[in-house]
């Protein structure tokens, strides 16, 4: 179980060293640009760090590379987030990079703000 200070330091480092897909997605999510939703990035929640969190509505958006395919860790993490009342949306890095508009539209649809 990571300590809070270590988790905060890790989240800070993850904000500084984002992947290209995370940078692209943050460009879509930041500043309420996407349907007025207020997202934060690399947020410690419990013993985990969520890529992007919007507290109203309670939604977490994860941007994943191939190492996340069939991950038991991610399944446990998602279960914990859901138990805390969050909807968890996962998008592959390639989809975010190649289809950013479609990714944004899918997020809006998932939270009931899209066409």
Image: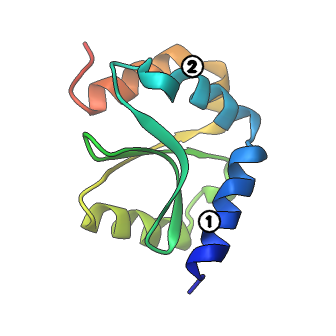
The residue at the far front in this view is 5
**Observer-nearest of 109 and 26:** 26
Q: Earlier in the sequence, mark 2 or mark 1?
A: 1
Q: Which residue is drawn at 44% across and 17% down?
A: 33
Left/right of residue 89 with respect to residue 1 in the rendered view: left
- Nearer the camera: disc 2 or disc 1: 1
Report x, y in % for residue 37.
35, 28
SS label for mark 2: helix
CB under 8 Å between callouts 2 and 1?
no
The residue at the far right in this view is 17
Report x, y in % for residue 72.
52, 72
The quarter of the picture where residue 111 lies is top left
For the residues labelled 2 and 1, the Cα–Cα distance comes to 29 Å
Residue 16, relative to residue 29: is it above or below?
below
Residue 15, relative to residue 82: is it above or below?
above
Left/right of residue 37 with respect to residue 18 in the rendered view: left
Q: Which residue is drawn at 27% across and 65% down?
A: 84
Residue 40, relative to residue 35: is it above or below?
below
Please name the residue that numbered disc 2 is placed on: 100
Report x, y in % for residue 29.
49, 27
Q: How many C-alpha atoms fall within 10 Å of the one at disc 2: few (<14), some, or many (≥20)?
A: some
The residue at the far bottom in this view is 1
The quarter of the picture where residue 80 lies is bottom left
Residue 39, relative to residue 99: is it above or below?
below
Please name the residue that numbered disc 1 is placed on: 8
**Observer-nearest of 43 and 59:** 43
SS label for mark 1: helix
- Looking at the image, how many numbered discs can be counted on the residues? 2
Report x, y in % for residue 26.
59, 30
The quarter of the picture where residue 86 lies is bottom left
């Amino acid at each position: 179980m990571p300590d809070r200070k270590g988790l905060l330091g890790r989240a800070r480092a993850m904000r500084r060293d984002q992947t290209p897909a995370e940078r692209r997605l943050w460009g879509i999510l930041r500043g309420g640009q996407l349907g007025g939703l207020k997202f934060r990035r690399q947020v410690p929640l419990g013993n985990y760090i969520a890529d992007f969190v919007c507290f109203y509505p309670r939604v977490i958006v994860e941007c994943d590379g191939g190492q996340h395919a069939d991950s038991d860790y991610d399944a446990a993490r998602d279960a914990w987030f859901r138990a805390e009342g969050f909807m968890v949306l996962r998008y592959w890095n390639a989809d975010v990079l190649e289809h950013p508009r479609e990714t944004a539209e899918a997020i809006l649809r998932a939270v009931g703000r899209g066409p």
